[in-house]
Amino acid sequence: MKTPLILLLTLALVIGCREAPEKDSTPPELTAPEYAKLGRDKLYVAWEFDAAREALLKAVEMNPEDALSHANLAWYWMLEDKREASMRHIELAKKAAPEDPLWVQWHGWICYFYDDFECAEKYLKEAIEMQPRQRDAYFTLGRMYYRIGREAEGLEYMEQAARDSTGRPARAMYLVLTGREAEAREIIRQIESAETTSLETMVLVPLYNMLGEREKALDWLEANYERRQPLLPWLRYMPINRPLHDEPRFQAMVEKIGAPSGK
């Protein structure tokens, strides 16, 4: 028997009017590497610190052997003035990759930022033993020794850091401290006029302050903000910048960055 045309039309209308099943609006779960990258981007590029913390915590939850994410969490917890958490995660980074001198060096940096000089010396020297061409470890040890009154050792380590062709900040600082201002200014000019790394332009801030040009130092601080230099959120922790802490422009920059502060 043939189906009446009216029935076919009715069936088509009913089927067409049925609501499609709702799609799941829950975003798909990211993988551990994706969370790790998201956390890095939020921490160092976007400066969205809560999102950075959550992504990095998720990354190490999914992959406890992710040394880089543990190390990045160590830097994040410093922003919240949570030293114990910071130290725990840098230890986890070293445990996950015990042969990588970078995490040992970062451990030394964190100790130095917390004014724990004995701890900083231990790990920075260990990083150098693991990889003798750790220019940044030499530079940090040099600044630390000079700061705590061990000037001869400080200059020796800064000179070691300056021997590398990429050690322009260390070379400039070494020259300032040894009274060779004209040579130092030539290196500063090179840094200002060339394609530079974030470390180089960050070091321009204390270099100009050491030369007695505080306003120029603060100008470079603001220029680093415009360049979104990834180290800037740790500005108030860097011992090298402490002479500028009372400056209103420095305080305004810390506020503008909006990093967490012991909350």
Image: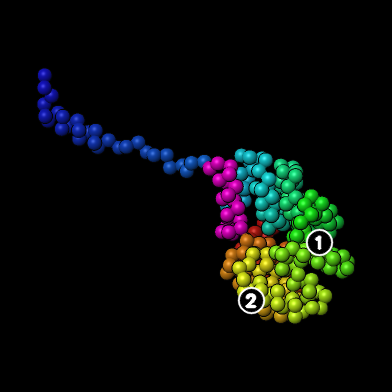
Say whether residue 192 is left or right of residue 171: left
Report the colour scheme: rainbow
Q: Residues within 10 Å of mark 1 (few under 14, many from 20)?
A: many
Residue at 67% from the left image edge and 40% from the top image edge: 65
Looking at the rendered structure, the secondary structure element under dot 1 is helix
Q: CA distance from mark 2 to mark 1?
A: 27 Å
Looking at the rendered structure, the secondary structure element under dot 2 is helix
Residue at 68% from the left image edge and 67% from the top image edge: 200
Q: Please give the label number shown on residue 87.
A: none
Q: 216 or 62: which is nearer to us? A: 216
170 to 14, vertically: above or below: below
Residue 114: x and y in percent read 78, 59
Q: Which residue is mark 2?
A: 219
User: Which image quadrant for residue 112?
Assistant: bottom right
Taking the magenta stretch, the answer to whether it contains residue 38 is yes
Q: Amino acid at mark 1?
A: Leu
Residue at 75% from the left image edge and 43% from the top image edge: 98
Residue 3: x and y in percent read 13, 24
Q: Which residue is mark 1?
A: 141
Residue 246 appears in the rendering: no
Mark with earlier residue (2, 1):
1
Dominant secondary-structure state across the stretch colored magenta: helix
Residue 130: x and y in percent read 79, 50
Residue at 55% from the left image edge and 41% from the top image edge: 31
Taking the magenta stretch, the answer to whether it contains residue 131 is no
50 to 247, vertically: above or below: above
- Residues rendered magenta in the picture: 30-49
230 to 58, vertically: above or below: below
Quadrant of the drawing holding the C terminus: bottom right
